Amino acid sequence: MASTEDKEASKEKASSWKDSIYNPRTGELLGRTASSWALILLFYLVFYCFLAGMFALTMWVMLLTLDDYVPRYRDRIPNPGLVIRPNSLDISFNKSDPLKYADYVKNLETFLQKYNETQQQVNDKCVPGDYTVQDDAEGMLKKVCPFKRSLLSFCSGISDTNFGYHEGKPCVLLKMNRIIGLMPHGDPYVNCTVKKDNPVQMHYFPKEGRFDKMYFPYYGKKAHENYVQPLVAVKLLLTKEDYNKELAVECKVEGSNLRNNDERDKFLGRVTFRIKVVE
């Protein structure tokens, strides 16, 4: 049986443990009196209010340096990438089955909606072959040069709503990524090649596959609110001997100072895609 001394020691330990949480004799809670808790809570309240104030002041000063229309810092590369539509780098379909190429046709038609006549006729006329520089223009909004889908001729989806897919001569659309202030020197145009022994004929729209300089420079999403990138359509005139084969097509932007041969970035000024047409 436990002795009296052991029982008293056990009671003292239990009492000591309870007193560490709340001591009724001194009024301490977790080792601090009410005034001590009040002082430390006041300190942290002032400390965190000071930090919040410093953060708000820093953000306010930073926002004062920003421009809603022109980014203060531009860390994007000065050369644009080349993008293809329909949005696929592996185009494969059966020309005899509309369901097999329906997604490609729908993707092209949806993409070209903003190039419709009704959308573009509200834009301003520009001088072909010249940059549309508007640095000294009144107001922050810049005029937009129109690019109508009719410029894409047989690849516009107007006269041929299937964009040539039903006849095994598909169209692809190419555009450059937007870069604020880009003014390519020279006369940029698209040139596509097929990696095979026998060349494949191609038609380019607009004429010679050129990106007219009047669509440059781009002033940013807010200043150039209705801006649309110029397009180049490539119609691949495939023949029967090209069917049922996977062809690798490489398109590059040439005729200017824009880079198209950087091995570290396969999409800088160029794009490579595969196409296969099944009879």
Image (spheres, rainbow, N blue to C red):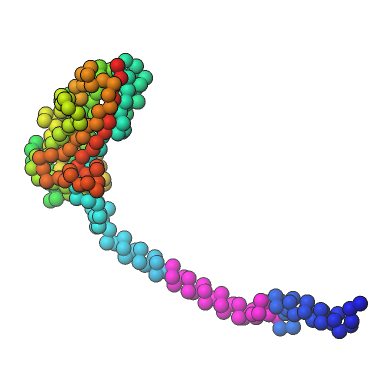
In the image, 20 versus 275, the foreground residue is: 275
Q: Please report the residue visible at 32 percent of the width from the left and 23 percent of the height from the top.
A: 93
In the image, 37 versus 174, the foreground residue is: 174
In magenta, the rendered stretch is 27-52
> Quick check: 93 above or below 253?
above
Residue 133 falls left or right of residue 108: left
Report whether residue 136 is seen: yes
Residue found farthest to the right: 1
**Percent x, y for residue 144?**
18, 39
Toward which corner of the image does residue 243 lie, by quadrant?
Answer: top left
Q: Please report the residue visible at 66 percent of the width from the left and 79 percent of the height from the top.
A: 31
Quadrant of the drawing holding the N terminus? bottom right
> Quick check: 262 above or below 95?
below
Q: Please report the residue visible at 75 percent of the width from the left and 80 percent of the height from the top.
A: 16
Quadrant of the drawing holding the C terminus? top left
**Percent x, y for residue 50?**
44, 72
**Percent x, y for residue 204?**
15, 28
Q: Please report the residue visible at 24 percent of the width from the left and 55 percent of the height from the top.
A: 74
Residue found farthest to the front: 197
Residue 233 is covered by the magenta coloring? no
Residue 44 is covered by the magenta coloring? yes
> Quick check: 74 above or below 268?
below
> Quick check: 207 above or below 40?
above
Number of numbered discs overlaid on the protein picture = 0
In the image, 171 versus 149, the foreground residue is: 171
Magenta region, main secondary structure: helix
Report whether residue 202 is seen: no
**Percent x, y for residue 234?**
19, 28
